[in-house]
Image (cartoon, coloured by chain):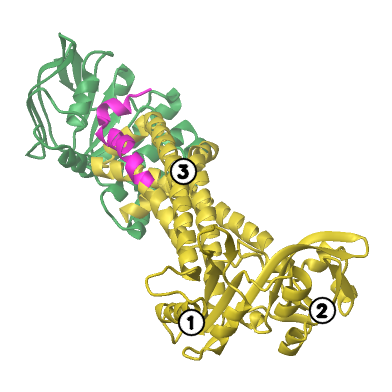
Chain colours: A green, B yellow
Amino acid sequence: MINVDNLKKTYYMGNQSLDALSGVTFEITKGEYVAIMGPSGSGKSTLMNIIGCLDSPTKGTYSLNNKEVSQMSDDELSKIRNTEIGFVFQNFSLLPRSSALENVMLPLQYAGISLSERKTIALDALEKVELLDRKDHKPSELSGGQQQRVAIARALVNNPSILFADEPTGNLDSQTGMKVLDIFKRLNENGQTIILITHENEVASAAKRIIHIKDGNISNDEIH
Amino acid sequence: MLIRESINTAVDAIRSNALRSILTTLAIIIGTAAVITMVSMGSSAQKAIDDSITKLGARTIYVYPGWSRSGSSSDRKRTLDIKDADALEDDREIDWKIAPEIRGSRQVKLNNESVSLEIIGSTANFFDIRGYELDEGTLFSERQDLSRKRVVVLGSSVPKELKTSKKRLLNNEISIAGVSFEVIGFIKSQGSNGWRNPDEQIYTPLYTASDRIFGRDTINSINVDFSTDYRVEEVMIAIERVLRREHDIGPGEENNFRINDWSQAVDLRREATSIFFALIVGIAGISLLVGGIGVMNIMLVSVTERTREIGLRKALGATSKVILTQFMIEAITLCLIGGLIGVVLGTSLYFLIAFLQDWPIVFPFTAIIGSVFFSAIVGLFFGIWPARRAAKLDPAVALRYE
């Protein structure tokens, strides 16, 4: 499903260059639950940006569902992000002035789905994260755990091929964090491909496979 | 559909910063209000003029005296007198109505009150030609004119000038330049036409005015009223023919009188008004320009403030075009809100002024549509840059923006 081959990303600052990724190669198949792990500055965020189609590699190839992504235009990338990828962020990233339901409906709006259909699908997604009773609440009226569940519902609403979670428990206490990881586990058991980006061992151990990144390279790729 | 969503988002964003948004659009509000008020006031003035022209379906040409040089000396004398008016009256080529006017300011006294007012001496059909309607009492008749009766008809605010009421004045005497006159009627309030205020004038028969007040038979003007069946040029030529004959003007010599179609004056006035308009539109344009820069500034701030939101929207699948549209619509909405507030303010202000000044009210459709349209254009123009900036944000960078 995901094929990354010799991926390189170089940042230029003035006449200095910095290799954030120096030739990364791996493969992720459908239904896997993978954690990408590494300390800050290891290049894991850069890797996530590239396989999340938020950024393009300097060199190398990346194909998603047999489509070569690295050469796509901005609009094509937007479309891929909209239909193939669901993001869950550390800081939840909900629109503060919109209700839970409106937040979950947002990706569907960009997909050009009609309002009534959007509502049905979004309500469905909220039900999966057990937040149907909070659908009209604004993010500020929800707890951190609830906000992250809204964000998960939003990530899933377009039936993405991959669910990306960038430090999803980073802003949560350990108990709430565990609950979120339980949701991921359940989703994975139902066949959802999940990629978890984290620097915490505990969190990473929730995944079936852990890819360790260090200094822009894969230092270890273990399945347990 | 995308447009509707964007409008909702825009209104939301504007509402969440209501005070800032209002302050931002202040210049647009002021500009729009100024345009609406001024343009409407101009239309009102125009309507007042047009109304007085088209009253009774007739038109009026005015004949004014010129100056003549007799012999080698350069002594000048007024060249229009009652005989000229009579000659026009007797000429039957065109079916016109003639009302000569003899005019001047005199002291008017009642008991101890004394004010200087304009006295107009004219014939009985003067009121008809001017479209002045009787309010109370009677108008003077041709017979009263010929017998030089000392009667006057007053404009509606004359009693107030003399610190009394219509009731007390009617059928009583007032003194004009030391001669007493009986008040026989009042005309309805006409409102000022911008040059003269008929409400503050006193009307008396022509011969009475000539003999008993002014002591001259030269007159100030002749009103020539004709139906719209005739062309203005045709009537002017007829007047010229009669008066040249009366004044013994030989071929090749110049007229010693002036014939004015009022439309010339109206044209002049229109021209003056259009210069005034241009000035106002210029000021409004500057105001809208300043407003537009304000909007651009606040949109740039907004884009920076909402960098993360933009990043998120892009991550969720919004294309650059969607982001561009969203911010464009926000800028346009901002300007439109300013424009609409300006429209409400400007229209209210105009209605208030028109009401207080007793002007005819012309609902300023064109001005409203024009200024709303223009404020949208300002939003469009000044929204482009901030919106492009938002659209071009790199989602990976924007998402991490603190």
Vertical arrangement, residue B395 with respect to residue B2, above or below: above
From the image, tell me which residue sits under label 2: B150
Disc 1 vs disc 3: Cβ atoms closer than 8 Å?
A: no
Left or right: residue B309 versus residue B339 is left
Of circles 1 and 2, which is in front? Answer: 1
Vertical arrangement, residue A41 with respect to residue A55, above or below: above
Q: Chain of mark 3?
A: B
Q: CA distance from mark 1 to mark 2?
A: 31 Å
Of circles 1 and 3, which is in front? Answer: 1
Q: Around disc 3, counting alpha carbons within 10 Å, would you say few (fewer than 14), some (14 to 19), or many (20 or more)?
A: some
Vertical arrangement, residue B197 with respect to residue B296, above or below: below
Please identify the quarter of the rendering in which residue B186 is found: bottom right
Residue B242: mark: 1
From the image, tell me which residue sits under label 3: B283
Residue B400 coordinates in the image, percent (x, y): 32, 24
* Residue A135 in sight here: no
Left or right: residue A175 versus residue B159 is left
Find out whether residue B389 is within the magenta segment.
yes
